[in-house]
Image: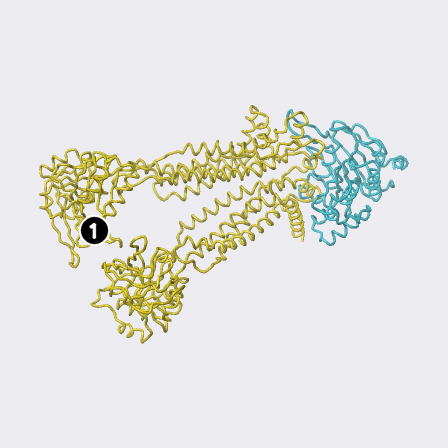
C-alpha cells in the first residue's frame, strides 16, 4: 500500500446515513447518521455487537437497501439518485459481495456463478466465461469451474464467491463475515485473498466480530446501536507505518 | 444482446430447477396438460364421429356412381346442392318422370334402378320390428360401396335378400317374414350378411328391385311437401350433372344428388345457393366464455405449483439481484419456467390426446349408431388448444413471478421468511370488480336472453374475488387467536405466505362458485316445474285412452274394443268405479279428421273470435266431451261444479282462460271435417246456448262439454274415447303391469294415473355430480399448498418438538391448513356463486304466456348442497389429509 493509493476520492462514502426499519413504536434505528469512507487499496473492518448495524451498513453500501436519510456514493455516484436500475448496474460492474453463507446459486456451476454479473450485464457468454475462469484461477480454484456448489467444500465455495465478487474490474468489495462458516485455517486463507485484492487497488469493507480478523484491515470502525463509536488504525493520510502495522 | 443473454440465463436456471424438483414440476405439468389432453381427445373424436356431407357421399352414392336420381312425388322439386336435408315442392305434375324422360335431359347412361329406405316390419325373435328395406342389385358395379358382403352371397332372385348384422342380432333365421305398410306379408330367403355403409345398428334388408310391392305409399315419401326420403330412382354413371340439367330434372319431379356438386359445393353456390351454415354470435360467445372459465380454473389450480417454485428459488433470485440483476431479470427466471412447462404441456397434451382418441375409436364406435368417419385431426383446433395450454402456464406463473421480483433481497439473503407486503390497491380493485359483476348480473337478470351476460358477470365476480382473498385470509388469521394451536398456526402461516395461499383459496372459491350457481339454477328450475305443474286429473284418479297407432306409427283407423279394455281394467281394479267417456272422435284417423273450435258470437267481423286459449286436457282421448250431465268425471265436477246442470239444460259448457268471455250465454261451434281424396274441408257453424266458465281449480280442463243433442246439431262425430277410473289405488308397478296388458290388446290402450308432480331423478344426479366435482377440485387445490406449507413450517415444527409437542401435531397442522384454505375458499365461492345463481333464475324460470300474464321467477336455494360443499367438504378434506400425512416431527439438528 502507498499513501498515494489511499489518498484521493474514496471508492465508498457514506455521508450521514440513517436507516430506520419500521415506524412508530416498532421503529428500529439500524444506522444513525453514520459517515464512513473506504479508499482504493484500503481494507476497512467494521466491528460491533449483534444488532449494532454492521450488516445494514453493508447492504446500504451495496445498494441493496436504501437509507432513510443521507447519501451513499460509490465511485462518486450517488446511489439514491441512480435508481433501482442504476444500483443494479453498479452491482454488476463495480461492487462485489461476499456473504457468510457463500450464497452461490445451487443451479449454476462455479464458473457460471462467477460469470453471473457479466452475463446479467450483457457480456457474451464466451467472454464472460473467460473472465470468470481468470478470476477462479486467481483464487486457485480454476479446476472447480464446472462443479456445482454442493460438490465443493465450504472453503472452495467461499473462494468461488470471492471470485464472483472480484470478476471484472470491481473497485469495491463488501464482505459480510466471510469466514463465519469456515474453520480458522480456511478463514485465514480467505482473508489473505481479500487483503491481496485490496492491495491490488480495490477498496474493501469487512464486517466481522473477530478481532484477529480485523487485524487484516487497515482501519477498524466500531459500531454500537447504529452509531460509529470508535475508529482505530490510520485514516486516509495517516502514516504508512501505522497502516503497515496491521498488515 | 443483453436481452437475449438474460433470457438464456433465465431458461438455464428454470430448466435446471424443474429437473431438480421433478415432483413439483410434474404437478404443474399435470394441471396444465390434463385439460389440453382432454379437449384434444374429445375434439378429435367429435370430428371423427361426425360425418360431413363430403365424407358421407359414399354412403349415399356408393364409391362408383356419379349421381342418384330419385322421384320426389307428384310435384316439381325445389332443392339445394345436397338434397339429403330435405327439398321443397313446386307445381303439380300429371305423371311421374320415366327413364326416357330423364335420358332426354342427361343423355343415355347406365342407370341402376333402386328404391332405398322403405320402412317395413321384420319378424324377429322379439316380435315385429321396424327395418329399412332397400331394393337394388347390390352386386352391380354402380352399387359398389353401398354395402359390403360379410358372409354368404348376394341375392340372385326375387325371393332372396341379404341382411345386416343388426338384424341378425335380433334373432332371425334363414327365412325372414317382412310386412309392408299395406299389411302384405312375404317370406324371403336370407342368403348373406352385409355391412351397410350408412347405418350400424338399424336393421337393414336388401333385395333385388321388385322384391317389395310396386310403388311407395304417400307415407313412404316422407310424409308431406318437404320430403326427406325420396322414392324410387336410379344410380347413374357418366359425367356429372350440370346445374342446368339439375334444374331440368327438378322440373320433372326428380331429386338429384350429384357427387361432384356435393363435394365441390362452393363452385355452385351462385347458381344453386348454399346449403346453409351461419355464423352464430351466441355460439362464439359461449365458446369464449368456456375458454375463459377453463383458463381461470387451470391458472388457479396450477398457480400454487408455480408459487412453490418461485418460493424455492427465492434465494437464487435474490442472489441474481445481489449480483446486479434487475427485478425484470429475476422475473424472467419464473416466466421461463412457465414457458418450459407450458410448451411441454401443450405438446404433451396434444400428442397424448391424439393417441387417446385413436385408442378410443372402438369405444366411440360402440356408442354410435352410424359408422365413424375417417380418423380426423383438426390441426387448427389442436393449435388453439395447445395455445390455451401455453397461455395457462404463462398466466399461472405471472403472479408468482411478479411477487418474486418484489421480494426483499436483504431479508431473503438473511434467511428471514415471509412474503413482500401486499399491494394496497388490490383489495379495492377486487371489491370494485365484484361490484361491477353484481351490476352486470342484475342487467342480465331479464326474462329472456340474459344468460350469457350473467355468465360473464360470474367471470368478473371471480376475478374480483381473487383479489379479495388475501384480505379475507387476513381476517381469518385475526380471529384465529381463539382457536387451538394447530388452527392458529395454520391460519397465521397462511397469511404470512400469501403467494401460496391465495391461488389455492381462489381455486377452491372458483370451483364452489360454479357449484353454488349451478345448484341454485337447477333447484330453482325444479321449483318452477313443481309449482307450475298442472294435474290433468283429480289426485289418485286414472284415465284410459286408446292407442290407435300401428307399428309404423301411423293411425290404424280401427275402432277400439272398449268392452275388452274395460274388462282388462276391471280385472286389475275390481272395486274401482269405471265410467265410459264419449267425445269428439279422434282427430288423427287416417280416413277423416274433424276439428272443432268455439267462437264468440258477438265478436266483430274479422276479429279474433276463438274462445280460449289452451292447452286443453286430452286425458280421456278427446278434448271435447259429450255428456248428458250424468256420471261426469270428477275432473269436470271440480273444474265446473255447475256443468252437470248446464248440460242437462241442453247448454254447452266451454272452458276459457279469458274472464271477459264468461259473460257470453251462447257460442258458435265451428266444425271442419276433412276426407282424404277430397279437396278442401267441409265446414259447419252453429250457434248454441252455452256457459263459458273459468276453471275453478288448477287442473287442466278439456276444451268443452256438449250435450248429445248439441253435438248432433253441430255435426260433431261422437264415439267412446276413454274410461274414467275413480281412485283405482294402483301402485306404480301395478300401473306398469296394467299398461302392458292394455297395450297388448288387439286394439291397444293405455292408462294414466294422476300422482301429482314427480320430481325428476336428474336433479339428484346433477347435485351429486356437482358435489363430487367440488370435492375433487377442492382436494386438488389444497394439496399442493398444504405440502409446501408443511415444508416451510419445518423449522417451526422442529421448535414445537423441542418444547415438547407430540408427533401428531404435524398431522393436525396439515389438516388445519387444508381446512383453512378449503373453508375460506368455500365461503368466498358461496358468496360469489349466489350472484349468478340468483340472477339466472329470472331468465330460467320466468314464463311469458303471450299476453295472458306470466309466471315466475322462482328461486330455490339448495341449502343442503351448499352446507355440504361449504362445511362438509372442507372438514372431509382436512380429515383425509390428516389421516394420510405422516406424523413425525423434524428435529432441530437436522434442519441445517
Identify the residue at image location x=59%, y=47%: B338
Dot 1 alpha-carbon crowd within 10 angstroms: few under 14, some 14 to 19, many 20 or more: some
Farthest residue toward the bottom?
B108
Residue A194's x, y, as percent? 82, 41
Quadrant of the rendered image containing residue B801: top right
In the rendered image of the structure, the colour used to display chain B is yellow
* The N terminus of chain A: image quadrant: top right
Between residue B473 and residue B250, name the one nearer to us.
B250
Q: Chain of mark 1?
A: B
B803 with respect to B147 (left or right): right
Vertical position of residue B606 compared to residue A34: above or below: below
Vertical position of residue B347 compared to residue B783: above or below: below
Residue B799's x, y, as percent? 67, 28
Residue B259's x, y, as percent? 38, 67
Q: Which residue position is annotated with label 1?
A: B588
Would residue B266 be seen by someone viewing this image from the given angle?
Answer: no
Between residue B781 and residue B481, name the one nearer to us.
B781
A39 with respect to A85 (left or right): right
Would residue B170 be seen by someone viewing this image from the given angle?
Answer: yes
Residue B426's x, y, as percent? 54, 36
* The C terminus of chain A: image quadrant: top right
Chain drawn cyan in the picture:
A
Farthest residue toward the front?
B174
Farthest residue toward the top?
B482
Between residue B485 and residue A240, name the one nearer to us.
B485
Identify the residue at image location x=60%, y=37%: B787
Please count the marks in the image.
1
B666 with respect to B392 (left or right): left
Farthest residue toward the right?
A241
B596 with respect to B14 (left or right): left
Between residue B628 and residue B646, name the one nearer to us.
B628
Amino acid at each position: 500500500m502507498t499513501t498515494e493509493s489511499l489518498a484521493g476520492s474514496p471508492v465508498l462514502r457514506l455521508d450521514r446515513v440513517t436507516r430506520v426499519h419500521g415506524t412508530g413504536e416498532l421503529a428500529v434505528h439500524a444506522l444513525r447518521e453514520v459517515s464512513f469512507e473506504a479508499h482504493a487499496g484500503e481494507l476497512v473492518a467494521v466491528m460491533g455487537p449483534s444488532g449494532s448495524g454492521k450488516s445494514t451498513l453493508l447492504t446500504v453500501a451495496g445498494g441493496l437497501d436504501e437509507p432513510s436519510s443521507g447519501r451513499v456514493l460509490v465511485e462518486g455516484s450517488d446511489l439514491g439518485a441512480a435508481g433501482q436500475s442504476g444500483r443494479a448496474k453498479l452491482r454488476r460492474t463495480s461492487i462485489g459481495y461476499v456473504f457468510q453463507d457463500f450464497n452461490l446459486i445451487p443451479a449454476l456451476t462455479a464458473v457460471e456463478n462467477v460469470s453471473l454479473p457479466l452475463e446479467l450485464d450483457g457480456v457474451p457468454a464466451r467472454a464472460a466465461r473467460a473472465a470468470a475462469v481468470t478470476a477462479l484461477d486467481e483464487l486457485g480454484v480454476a479446476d472447480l469451474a464446472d462443479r456445482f456448489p454442493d460438490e465443493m467444500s465450504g472453503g472452495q465455495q467461499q473462494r468461488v464467491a470471492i471470485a464472483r465478487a472480484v470478476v471484472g474490474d470491481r473497485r469495491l468489495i463488501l464482505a459480510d463475515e466471510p469466514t463465519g462458516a469456515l474453520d480458522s485455517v480456511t478463514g485465514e486463507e480467505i482473508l489473505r485473498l481479500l487483503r491481496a485484492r485490496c492491495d491490488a487497488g480495490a477498496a474493501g469493507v469487512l464486517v466481522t466480530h473477530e478481532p484477529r480478523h480485523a487485524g487484516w484491515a487497515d482501519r477498524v470502525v466500531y459500531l454500537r446501536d447504529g452509531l460509529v463509536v470508535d475508529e482505530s488504525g490510520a485514516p486516509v493520510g495517516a502514516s504508512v507505518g501505522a497502516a503497515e502495522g496491521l498488515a | 444482446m443483453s436481452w437475449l443473454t438474460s433470457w438464456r440465463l433465465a431458461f438455464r436456471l428454470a430448466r435446471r430447477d424443474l429437473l431438480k424438483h421433478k415432483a413439483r414440476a410434474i404437478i404443474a405439468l399435470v394441471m396444465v396438460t390434463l385439460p389440453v389432453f382432454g379437449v384434444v381427445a374429445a375434439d378429435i373424436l367429435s370430428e371423427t364421429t361426425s360425418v360431413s356431407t363430403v365424407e358421407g357421399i359414399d354412403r349415399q352414392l356408393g364409391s362408383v356412381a356419379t349421381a342418384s336420381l330419385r322421384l320426389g312425388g307428384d310435384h316439381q322439386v325445389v332443392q339445394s346442392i345436397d338434397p339429403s336435408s330435405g327439398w321443397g315442392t313446386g307445381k303439380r305434375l300429371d305423371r311421374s318422370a320415366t327413364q326416357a324422360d330423364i335420358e332426354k335431359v342427361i343423355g343415355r347412361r347406365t342407370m341402376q334402378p333402386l328404391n332405398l329406405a322403405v320402412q317395413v316390419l321384420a319378424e324377429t325373435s322379439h316380435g315385429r320390428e321396424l327395418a329399412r328395406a332397400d331394393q337394388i342389385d347390390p352386386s352391380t358395379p354402380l352399387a359398389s360401396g353401398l354395402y359390403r358382403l360379410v358372409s354368404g352371397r348376394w341375392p340372385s332372385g326375387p325371393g332372396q335378400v341379404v341382411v345386416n348384422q343388426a338384424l341378425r342380432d335380433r334373432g332371425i333365421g334363414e327365412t325372414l317374414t317382412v310386412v309392408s305398410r299395406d299389411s302384405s306379408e312375404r317370406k324371403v330367403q336370407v342368403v348373406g350378411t352385409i355391412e351397410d355403409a350408412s347405418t350400424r345398428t338399424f336393421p337393414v334388408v336388401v333385395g333385388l328391385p321388385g322384391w317389395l310391392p310396386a310403388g311407395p305409399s304417400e307415407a313412404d315419401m316422407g310424409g308431406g311437401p318437404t320430403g326427406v326420403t325420396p322414392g324410387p330412382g336410379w344410380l347413374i354413371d357418366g359425367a356429372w350433372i350440370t346445374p342446368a340439367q339439375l334444374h331440368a330434372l327438378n322440373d320433372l319431379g326428380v331429386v338429384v344428388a350429384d357427387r361432384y356438386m356435393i363435394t365441390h359445393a362452393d363452385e355452385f353456390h351462385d347458381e344453386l345457393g348454399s346449403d346453409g351454415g351461419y355464423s352464430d354470435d351466441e355460439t362464439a360467445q359461449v365458446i369464449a366464455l368456456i375458454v375463459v372459465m377453463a383458463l381461470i380454473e387451470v391458472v388457479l389450480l396450477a398457480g400454487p405449483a408455480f408459487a412453490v417454485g418461485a418460493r424455492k428459488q427465492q434465494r437464487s433470485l435474490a442472489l441474481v439481484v445481489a449480483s446486479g440483476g434487475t427485478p425484470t431479470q429475476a422475473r424472467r427466471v419464473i416466466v421461463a419456467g412457465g414457458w418450459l412447462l407450458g410448451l411441454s404441456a401443450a405438446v404433451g397434451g396434444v400428442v397424448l390426446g391424439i393417441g387417446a382418441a385413436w385408442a378410443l375409436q372402438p369405444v366411440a364406435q360402440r356408442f354410435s349408431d352410424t359408422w365413424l368417419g375417417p380418423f380426423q385431426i383438426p390441426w387448427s383446433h389442436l393449435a388453439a388448444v395447445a395455445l390455451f395450454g401455453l397461455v395457462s402456464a404463462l398466466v399461472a406463473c405471472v403472479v408468482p413471478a411478479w411477487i418474486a421480483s418484489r421480494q426483499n433481497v436483504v431479508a431473503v439473503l438473511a434467511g428471514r421468511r415471509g412474503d413482500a407486503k401486499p399491494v394496497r390497491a388490490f383489495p379495492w380493485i377486487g371489491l370494485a370488480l365484484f361490484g361491477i359483476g353484481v351490476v352486470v348480473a342484475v342487467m342480465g337478470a331479464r326474462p329472456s336472453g340474459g344468460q350469457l351476460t350473467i355468465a360473464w358477470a360470474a367471470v368478473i365476480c371471480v376475478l374480483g374475488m381473487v383479489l379479495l382473498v388475501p384480505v379475507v385470509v387476513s381476517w381469518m388469521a385475526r380471529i384465529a387467536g381463539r382457536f387451538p394451536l394447530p388452527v392458529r398456526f395454520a391460519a397465521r402461516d397462511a397469511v404470512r405466505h400469501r403467494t401460496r395461499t391465495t391461488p389455492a383459496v381462489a381455486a377452491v372459491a372458483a370451483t364452489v362458485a360454479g357449484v353454488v350457481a349451478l345448484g341454485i339454477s337447477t333447484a330453482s328450475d325444479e321449483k318452477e316445474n313443481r309449482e307450475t305443474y298442472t294435474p290433468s286429473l283429480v289426485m289418485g284418479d286414472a284415465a284410459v285412452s286408446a292407442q290407435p297407432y300401428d307399428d309404423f306409427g301411423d293411425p290404424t283407423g280401427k275402432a277400439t274394443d272398449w268392452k275388452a279394455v274395460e274388462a282388462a281394467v276391471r280385472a286389475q281394479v275390481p272395486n274401482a268405479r269405471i265410467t265410459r267417456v264419449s267425445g269428439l272422435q279422434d282427430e288423427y284417423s287416417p280416413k277423416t279428421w274433424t276439428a272443432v273450435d268455439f267462437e264468440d258470437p258477438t265478436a266483430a267481423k274479422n276479429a279474433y273470435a276463438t274462445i280460449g286459449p289452451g292447452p286443453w286436457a286430452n286425458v280421456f282421448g278427446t278434448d271435447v266431451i259429450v255428456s248428458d250431465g250424468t256420471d261426469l268425471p270428477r275432473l269436470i265436477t271440480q273444474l265446473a261444479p255447475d256443468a252437470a246442470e248446464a248440460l242437462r239444460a241442453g247448454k254447452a259448457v266451454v272452458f276459457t282462460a279469458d274472464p271477459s268471455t264468461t259473460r257470453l250465454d251462447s257460442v258458435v261451434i265451428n266444425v271442419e271435417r276433412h276426407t282424404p281424396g277430397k279437396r278442401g274441408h267441409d265446414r259447419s257453424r252453429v250457434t248454441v246456448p252455452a256457459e263459458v266458465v273459468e276453471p275453478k281449480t288448477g287442473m287442466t280442463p278439456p276444451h268443452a262439454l256438449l250435450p248429445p243433442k248439441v253435438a248432433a246439431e253441430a255435426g260433431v262425430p261422437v264415439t267412446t274415447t276413454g274410461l274414467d277410473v275413480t281412485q283405482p289405488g294402483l301402485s306404480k308397478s301395478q300401473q306398469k303391469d296394467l299398461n302392458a296388458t292394455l297395450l297388448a290388446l288387439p286394439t291397444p290402450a293405455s292408462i294414466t294415473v294422476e300422482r301429482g308432480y314427480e320430481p325428476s331423478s336428474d336433479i339428484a344426479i346433477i347435485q351429486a355430480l356437482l358435489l363430487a366435482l367440488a370435492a375433487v377440485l377442492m382436494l386438488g387445490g389444497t394439496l399442493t399448498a398444504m405440502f409446501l406449507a408443511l415444508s416451510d413450517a419445518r423449522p417451526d415444527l422442529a421448535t414445537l418438538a423441542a418444547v415438547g409437542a407430540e408427533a401428531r401435531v404435524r398431522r393436525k397442522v396439515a389438516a388445519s391448513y387444508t381446512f383453512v384454505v378449503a373453508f375460506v375458499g368455500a365461503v368466498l365461492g358461496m358468496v360469489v356463486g349466489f350472484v349468478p345463481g340468483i340472477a339466472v333464475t329470472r331468465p330460467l324460470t320466468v314464463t311469458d304466456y303471450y299476453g295472458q300474464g306470466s309466471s315466475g321467477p322462482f328461486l330455490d336455494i339448495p341449502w343442503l348442497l351448499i352446507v355440504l360443499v361449504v362445511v362438509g367438504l372442507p372438514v372431509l378434506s382436512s380429515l383425509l389429509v390428516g389421516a394420510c400425512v405422516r406424523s413425525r416431527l423434524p428435529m432441530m439438528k437436522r434442519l441445517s
